[in-house]
C-alpha cells in the first residue's frame, strides 16, 4: 500500500534491506499521521485501489469483474467508496490463474458460482481443463499445418523471378 499523507520522512533503506524493498527509499509517515492502509487492515477492509495494488490488477478491471458477476458487489462507505474484505484478493488471484490457463470469464464465473453455492468445483474444473487441452492440441495442429504451408510458399519464393509475376496476380508466391 503506498499512501502519502501530509509531510513524509524519506529514508534510504539500509543495504541489508535492499532485497526486501523494491523502491529506492522508504516513505514513513511523520509521527501522529495514520496510514489509511493500516487502518483498513485493522478493520479488515480495503478500498478498491488498495485491493487493486495488492492483487496486481486495476480498479477498472475490478469494476468490470464486479459488473460481470465475478466479484461480489462491494459494500460502500457513506462517501460511496467501494470497500472489500481480504477474500476478494484471493478471488482475484483465482480469476488471474483461470485466465492464465486460458479459461474464459464465463467459465471462471461458472466455477465461482459452484463455489459460492457451497460446492467443490474440482470436477467441473477438471472438465474445463480437459476441454482446454483438446482445444490447444487442435490449435497446435492448425499452426503446424500453417507452418508447413508458409514454409512451402517460402521455398517457392526462394528463387525470385519478377518477370514471372503478372500484374493481375500481385505476387505469384501467394
Image (tube, rainbow, N blue to C red):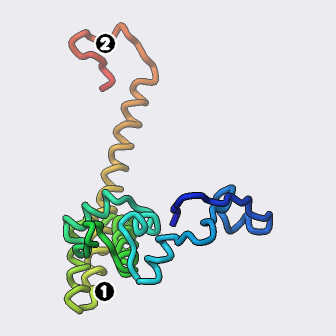
Residue visible at 52% across and 61% down in the picture: 5
Marking on residue 173 = none
**Residue 39 at x, y percent in the picture:** 47, 77
Looking at the image, can residue 59 be seen?
yes
Residue visible at 51% across and 67% down in the picture: 1
Name the side, left or right, on which 23 lies relative to 79. Answer: right
Q: Quadrant of residue 52?
A: bottom left
Marking on residue 165 = 2
Residue visible at 28% across and 72% down in the picture: 77
Label 2 element class: loop
**Residue 25 at x, y percent in the picture:** 68, 58
| Outermost residue to the front | 32
Placement of 37 over or under 126, stated as above or below:
above
**Residue 3 at x, y percent in the picture:** 51, 62
Placement of 14 over or under 156, stated as above or below:
below
**Residue 10 at x, y percent in the picture:** 68, 58
* Of the image marks 2 and 1, the number of the one nearer the N terminus: 1
Which residue is denoted by mark 1 in the rendering? 122
Amino acid at each position: 500500500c503506498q499512501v502519502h499523507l501530509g509531510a513524509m520522512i524519506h529514508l534510504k533503506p539500509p543495504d541489508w534491506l535492499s532485497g526486501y524493498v523494491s523502491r529506492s527509499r522508504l516513505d514513513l509517515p511523520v509521527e501522529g499521521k495514520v496510514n489509511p492502509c493500516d487502518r483498513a487492515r485493522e478493520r479488515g477492509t480495503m478500498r478498491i485501489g488498495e485491493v487493486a495494488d495488492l492483487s496486481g490488477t486495476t480498479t477498472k478491471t475490478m469494476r468490470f469483474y464486479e459488473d460481470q458477476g465475478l466479484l461480489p458487489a462491494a459494500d460502500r462507505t457513506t462517501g460511496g467508496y467501494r470497500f472489500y474484505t481480504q477474500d476478494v484478493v484471493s478471488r482475484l488471484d483465482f480469476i488471474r490463474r483461470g485466465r492464465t490457463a486460458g479459461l474464459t470469464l464465463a467459465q471462471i464465473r461458472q466455477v465461482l458460482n459452484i463455489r459460492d453455492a457451497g460446492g467443490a468445483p474440482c470436477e467441473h474444473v477438471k472438465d474445463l481443463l480437459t476441454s482446454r487441452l483438446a482445444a490447444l492440441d487442435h490449435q497446435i495442429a492448425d499452426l503446424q499445418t500453417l507452418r508447413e504451408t508458409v514454409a512451402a510458399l517460402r521455398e517457392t519464393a526462394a528463387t525470385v523471378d519478377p518477370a514471372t509475376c503478372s500484374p493481375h496476380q500481385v505476387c505469384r508466391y501467394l
